[in-house]
Image: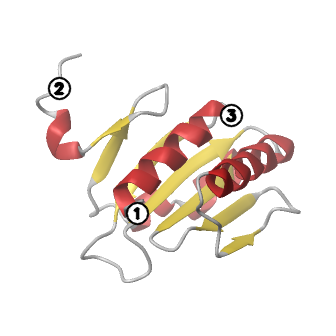
């Protein structure tokens, strides 16, 4: 599974659990940490944990194990590291405070639809509503 496919799969899985404000940032060429960041929010600590646990379980079923998971116990900011894709699941308050989107504002974004499906930003201009 390539990086973009992994990122899209993770976005769909996060959407399955009703994550909020889901975005995918393309970091290629801007960062050596990963190719993509996925950022989303949950409304409570329980919701944040449910999103993260769902991602971990379903990606494992697809043969992709997380290299590391941080913050699951607290449920305020959970980071899942899938090597080339890093997922940040925030409680809404933490997301506003840390503002990762602002820190990485120069990176291209991949549009994510309500159902979790995505389209590359360059393709989004030609996509019909």
**Quarter holding the C terminus?**
top left
**Considering only vertical position in the picture, is 58 above or below 71?**
above
Label 2 sits on a secondary structure element that is loop
- At x 81%, y 62%, the residue is 72
Return the residue at label 3.
Answer: 17
Of 16 and 64, the residue lying toward us:
64
Return the residue at label 2.
Answer: 127
Badge 2: few (under 14), some or many (20 or more) residues near its Cα, within 10 Å? few
User: Do labels 1 and 3 touch, CB within 8 Å?
Assistant: no
What number of labels is visible? Answer: 3
Give x and y (percent) for residue 27. 33, 68
Q: In the image, 104: left or right of 13? A: left
Report the colour scheme: secondary structure
- At x 71%, y 45%, the residue is 51
Label 1 sits on a secondary structure element that is strand
In the image, farthest residue toward the bottom = 32
| Image-quadrant location for residue 20 | top right
Q: In the image, 122: left or right of 106? A: left
Give x and y (percent) for residue 2. 37, 62
Badge 3: few (under 14), some or many (20 or more) residues near its Cα, within 10 Å? some
Give x and y (percent) for residue 92. 67, 45
The alpha-carbon separation of the residues under discs 1 and 2 comes to 22 Å
**Considering only vertical position in the picture, is 80 above or below 113?**
below
- At x 39%, y 52%, the residue is 5
First along the sequence among labels 1 and 3:
3
| Image-quadrant location for residue 68 | bottom right
Return the residue at label 1.
Answer: 36
Of 56 and 90, the residue lying toward us:
56
The alpha-carbon separation of the residues under discs 3 and 2 comes to 26 Å
In the image, farthest residue toward the left = 126
């Amino acid at each position: 599974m390539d990086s973009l496919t992994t990122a899209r799969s993770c976005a769909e899985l996060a959407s399955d659990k009703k994550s909020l404000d889901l975005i995918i940032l393309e970091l290629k060429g801007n960062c050596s940490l990963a190719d993509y960041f996925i950022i989303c929010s949950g409304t409570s600590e329980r919701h944040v944990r449910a999103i993260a646990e769902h991602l971990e379980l379903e990606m494992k079923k697809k043969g992709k194990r997380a290299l590391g998971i941080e913050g699951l116990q607290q449920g305020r900011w959970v980071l899942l590291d899938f090597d080339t894709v890093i997922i940040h699941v925030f409680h809404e308050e933490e997301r506003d405070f840390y503002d990762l989107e602002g820190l990485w504002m120069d990176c291209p974004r991949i549009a994510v639809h309500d159902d979790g499906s995505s389209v590359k930003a360059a393709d989004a201009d030609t996509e019909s509503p």
